Amino acid sequence: MSQSQDSSDTGLTAENSKTDKDSEPPQSSQSVELSNQKPKRTSSATLQCPICNEAMISIHQLNRHIDDTHVESADTQKGREDPSSKLTTNEIVGNDIKSWIKKKLPAEPTSLFSPGKRKTINLDLLDGNRGFGLSDSLNDASKSPRSKEQLPMELLPLKSVSPRNSRTNEITRSHWRQPSINGALSCSHPSCKRTLNIKNGIVNCRKCGNLFCNEHTHCKVRLRNPEPGEGKLPLYDCTANGVWCRSCETCYLNKPDFVAGVEVTVNDVTVQFQQKRSEFIDTKTLRRIKIQKRFIKNANLITERFVANSRASFWNGFSLSAFNSKNDPLIAQQKQLVGSDNWQDDSITHCAICFTNFNFLIRKHHCRLCGRLVCNDPDGERMYCSILLPITSFIEKLPTLNYANLVKQNLPKMLEVPPESQDRISLRCCVDCKNDLLHSWKVSDELRQESDREIFTIYNGILVLKNTISTLLPRYRKLVEEISQSDADADRLDLNKARLRLMSALKDFEGASTRFRTQFLKLQDGKLCIKNEYSNHKQLVLNMYQSTIMFLQDNLETFKSLNAKIQENEKKTIEKMEAGVQQTERPRLTKREVREKREKLMVMKEQAFIVENLIDSATKQRKFDEIDLLLGNKNELAKEIAVLEEELGDEGF
Amino acid sequence: MPPSQRFAQFKLVLLGESAVGKSSVVHRFVKNTFDNMRESTIGAAFLTQSVTLPEINATVKFEIWDTAGQERYKSLAPMYYRNAHAALCVYDITNSSSFQKAQNWIKELKKQASEGIVICLVGNKADLEDERQVDANAVTAYVEELSGEGIQVFTEECSAKSGEGVLEIFTNVAKALPVEETINGASKPSAGRQSGVELNRRPQQQGCC
C-alpha cells in the first residue's frame, strides 16, 4: 500500500505547494503523475482524488479509492522509480500529507452521515464499488419515491459526479431484483427477518441478484459476465480476471474455488527449525568453550603473576604493579590471549553493551575474555556491562576445569588474599562472557537443589523404561513387517516373545507415569496442577509429565496398529489356506494335462470353425431359425475356448 | 388352432463309438439317403428335421447334433448333451465293444445331462443280422437293469442302410418328449424362435475367416 500512498502523495504535495487553489482547471491523472508541479482544483466542501479527480465524501473513502483504483497504475510505475529517492520523498511527503489531512478534516462535510450509517458505507466500500455503496441498489430503488425521500440530498449529485469504476460496471445487473414499491422488503437470507431499508441496507447479491441486508452480503466473489449463450447470471471466475463483487453467503459458499480450495496446504518447517536451532546452539556452545579456554589461560597467567609477585616483593610489589596498568606485561599477555584482532583498540567511543559514551567518569575497560571495550558497571546502573572479580570466585564455582597445577596449588593462598588487595588476582570481564562462563555452573546449580533430586530419580526411572520401549518397538515392527512379507510361521514365536516384552515394558511405563503424576501433581478443579511443595519446579515437572504422556500415547498407538496388522495378516493366511486347496491345483498343470487341454482346445476351435461354416450355409439357405441355434452354440464354444485358454495360460499355443 | 401351429422344438444329440453309423442314421432320417462311403464326422454336425405326431396333432422339430465318435472329439460331447432333451446312444450290433461304449455314454448322460433327458439305445446295422455280436437279450437285460436303477431307457434297432426302423426311433422319441407341456407351457425349452421369417432381422455380421 505504500506505493499507492506514494502516488497520492505526489499529488498532495503538489496541491499543498500551491496556495492559490481553484485558480486552474483540473488536470488529467496522467499529467499529475508526470509532473508534480501541476496544481489541482479542490472544493472546500468535498474531497477529490488527487489522481483522477473523483469526488469523495470522506478521507476514508478516499483512501479506499486510492488503494483500489490506483494501486495497479502505481505498481506499473514501480520499476521506473529509484528506490532510494522514493524513500526520501516518502519521508518528506509523509509530513506533508499529515498537514494536508489536518487541513482537510474540518472541511469534511459532517452532516452527511451519522456514525451508524457510516458503517454501512465502509461495508460497501469493501466491495471495491467506487461510489457510495447504497447507490448501486438505489439506482433501482430511486424509482420508488419512498426510498428517494430517504436519500440524503448530497448523494444524488455525488452519484453523477463520480464516474463509477469501470471494472464493477462490467458485471451485468440485468438480473438484479428490484425492490418492490409497496410493502416492506425483507432480507432474502433464510434466517434473517430484517426489513430492508437505508439503515439495514438494500443490497443485491451480484451473483444471484437477490436482495439482502448489509450484514448478509459481507462476502466477496470474483465474477465475470456471461458469454452469449451462458445465461443471464454472472459467472464465477476464480482467475485474476474476475472482478471482486459483493455476494450473499450462499453464492460465496458455492464458488468453485472455495469448494476445491478447502484443503489446507501444510508447510512443515520443523526440520528447518531444528536445523536452525541446532546451529544456534552449536555456535553458543562453541563460544562458551572458547570463553572457558580463555578463562583457564587467564587464570593460569594471573596465578603465575601472583606467585611471582608474592615471591619477589611480599610487601610492596603488588601496589606498584596494580596502578601501573598501562605498561603492565599482563595486559599484553592477555591481549595476545584474546587475539589482537579481537582486542578492540582505543578509538571506540561507545560501550559495546550499553552503548554509553565513554567519558572521564565512565572509563574504558577491556573484557579480558572477549576483548571488547566496555564500561565498568558492577552495580547495574546501566546494564552490568562489566565487572572486576577475583578469579578465585570463578574457580570456586568452576572447580572441574582443566587449570594448571600451579593454580590448584595456590588456590588456598589466593583465597586468603584480603578483599582490599584482591585487585591483584582479579579479572575484568563483560557481562556476556560472565554469563557464558558460568552457564554450566548455573545449570548444574539449578539441578543441584534438594527437591530436584526426587524428581530426577523418578524421572530417570521413566527414562530407562522409555529407552527400553524405544529399542523394543522398532525390533517388533521389523518382525511384523518380515512376517507380513514372508507369510512364514517360523518367526511367530519370536514375534510373540517380542510382543510380550514390549507389552510389559509399556505397562511398566504407564505405571511409572502414574506414579510420577501422583507424586508431583494433583487434581484441582478438574485440572492437573503441581503440588505446592514442588511449585518452584512447575515447568520442569509439567514438561516431564507431558513428554511422558505423549511418548506413551504415541507408542501405544503404534503398538496397537502393529497388532492390528498382525491380526489382519493372520486372517489373510487362514483365508489363503482355506482357498489354497483349489488354488494350488490350478497353476500346476502336468504335461499330460497340458497335452489334453491343448487337444481339447484344438477340437473346440475346429468345431467353432465348423459351426461358423454351418452358419454361413444356413444363411445362404435362409434357414434363419437354425442360425439362432448355431449362434448360441458358437457363443458356447467361444466361452469354452476362453476358459481353456485361461487354464492353459502360458502353456497355450 | 391349425395343426401347423402346434409345434415344439427339441434338441437331440447322437452319441456312440465311431463308425457305428450315427451320421448315417441321421441322414436317413433327415434326407432319407444312404452313403456307403460316408466319411467320418469332424466335430459335430448340425441338422434339423421335423416329425408329425398325428395322435396329438403336433409337429416336433428336432435340432440334431451329430457328434463325432472318434476319441479325439470326446470333449465336445458334454457341450452338446448338456442341455439336450433327447439323446440317441448308438451302437453297432456287429460290434460288442460299441455296445459297451453306448452303456458308458448312458452312464455319463445320467451323471452329467439334464434331468428328464430321453435316452434311446439304438442298435444300428440291423441289416447285418448274420454278423450280430450283441445279443438282443443282453440288451433287454441291460435296459431292465437300468430301469431297476430308476433310469428309463428305451431301445430300438434299425438299419440306416435299408432305412428300416429309423423313423420309428425318432417318432418314439418325439412321443416320449413332453410335447404338450412345451407347446402350452411357458417354459419352452430352447425353442426360442417361432417358425417363419422375421422381416426385421438384421443380416448376420460375419468375419472373413
Image (cartoon, coloured by chain):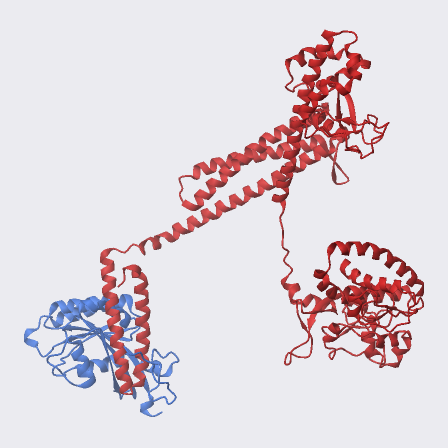
- Quarter location, residue A612: bottom left
Can you name the residue that lies furthest to the left here?
B130
Number of marks: 0
> Foreground: B173 or A159?
A159
Residue A430 can be seen, yes or no: yes
Left/right placement of residue A95 relative to residue A642 reads right
Can you name the residue that lies furthest to the bottom here?
B2
**Quarter of the rendering occupied by the C terminus of chain A:** bottom left
User: Residue A374, percent across and down?
Assistant: 78, 29
- Quarter location, residue A385: top right
What colour is chain A?
Answer: red
Compared to residue A499, the image places residue A12 above or below, namely: below
Residue A218 can be seen, yes or no: no
Compared to residue A427, the image places residue A528 above or below, namely: below
- Quarter location, residue A96: bottom right
User: Residue B83, percent across and down?
Assistant: 31, 73
**Quarter of the rendering occupied by the N terminus of chain A:** bottom right
What colour is chain B?
Answer: blue
> Foreground: A523 or A418?
A418
User: Residue A209, percent across and down?
Assistant: 74, 75
> Foreground: A35 or B189?
A35
Q: Residue at x 26, y 87 (%)?
A: B52
Compared to residue A613, the image places residue A15 above or below, namely: above
Compared to residue A265, the image places residue A485 above or below, namely: above
Q: Residue at x 86, y 55 (%)?
A: A95
User: Residue B37, percent across and down?
Assistant: 11, 79
